[in-house]
């Protein structure tokens, strides 16, 4: 599950299928920021905050809340097994390595089910991407994620502040990964958490 914490309307999320370095996202009403956790010998020694490609930055007060939460909870996240689950999967390369230009602000405007676990996603820059979620869902060992193999539950997706989400953020993917159609799946038969 990607949602770690919720503080008023600020969500702190972790995507287990994302690239290194280990990081969390702070989201609020379509705005987003990222905090990279610098880990040495299993301890968080530094946290670096940066804007997220394709999203407007958080407001000043949201940034303050995000920083407070991440700094206070970073060691807890490390010791709770979050890092272990992150290390067990195949992660795509850095966004900066992408040849495709990613718009500064990016939102999903429309979603159409295409049958099975495929969705057609329309973005506000006029592009459309067909994403097949079945490999990710089928490879997951986590019961909260596998629950979306139920066709009715999978069909319950919605667009919220430009993001594609299911349930109470039970399932949510980085907008850039959807835009680039690169939903990571477990490597070497490992199961995603």
Image (tube, helix red, strand yellow):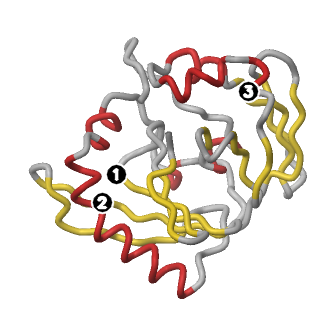
Q: Which residue is mark 1?
A: 21
Residue 154 in the figure: left or right of residue 176 = right
In this view, the mark in front (2 or 1): 2
Q: Secondary structure at mark 1?
A: loop
Which quadrant would residue 135 be assigned to in this image? Answer: top right
- Residue 37 — which label? 2
Q: Which residue is mark 3?
A: 154
Q: Secondary structure at mark 3?
A: helix
Say which label, 3 or 2, has the lower sequence index.
Answer: 2
Q: Residue at x 46, y 78 (%)?
A: 65
Q: CA distance from mark 2 to mark 1?
A: 7 Å
Location of residue 130 with respect to 180 vertically, above or below: above
Labels 2 & 1 near each other (Cβ < 8 A): yes
Location of residue 93 with respect to 68 vertically, above or below: above
Percent across and percent down for residue 113 are 87, 28
Percent across and percent down for residue 152 are 79, 22
Between 33 and 27, the one lying in front of the other is 27
Say which label, 1 or 3, has the lower sequence index.
Answer: 1
Q: CA distance from mark 1 to mark 3?
A: 30 Å
Q: Secondary structure at mark 2?
A: strand
Q: CA distance from mark 3 to mark 2?
A: 32 Å
């Amino acid at each position: 599950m990607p949602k770690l914490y919720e503080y008023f309307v600020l969500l702190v999320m972790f995507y287990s299928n994302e690239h290194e370095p280990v990081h969390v996202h702070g989201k609020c009403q379509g705005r987003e920021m990222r905090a990279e956790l610098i880990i040495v010998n299993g301890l968080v020694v530094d946290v670096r905050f940066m804007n997220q490609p394709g999203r407007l930055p958080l407001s000043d007060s949201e940034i303050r809340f995000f920083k407070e939460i991440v700094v206070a909870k970073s060691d807890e996240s490390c010791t709770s097994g979050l890092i272990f689950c992150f290390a067990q999967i195949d992660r795509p390369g850095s966004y900066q390595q992408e040849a495709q230009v990613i718009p500064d602000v990016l939102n999903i405007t429309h979603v159409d089910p295409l049958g099975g676990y495929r969705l057609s996603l329309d973005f506000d820059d006029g592009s459309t991407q067909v994403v097949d979620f079945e490999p990710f869902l089928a490879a997951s060992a986590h019961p909260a994620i596998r629950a979306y193999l139920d066709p009715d539950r999978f069909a319950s997706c919605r667009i919220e502040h430009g993001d594609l989400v299911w349930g109470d953020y039970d399932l949510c993917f980085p907008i850039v990964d959807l835009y680039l159609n690169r939903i990571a799946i477990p490597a070497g038969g490992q199961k995603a958490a």
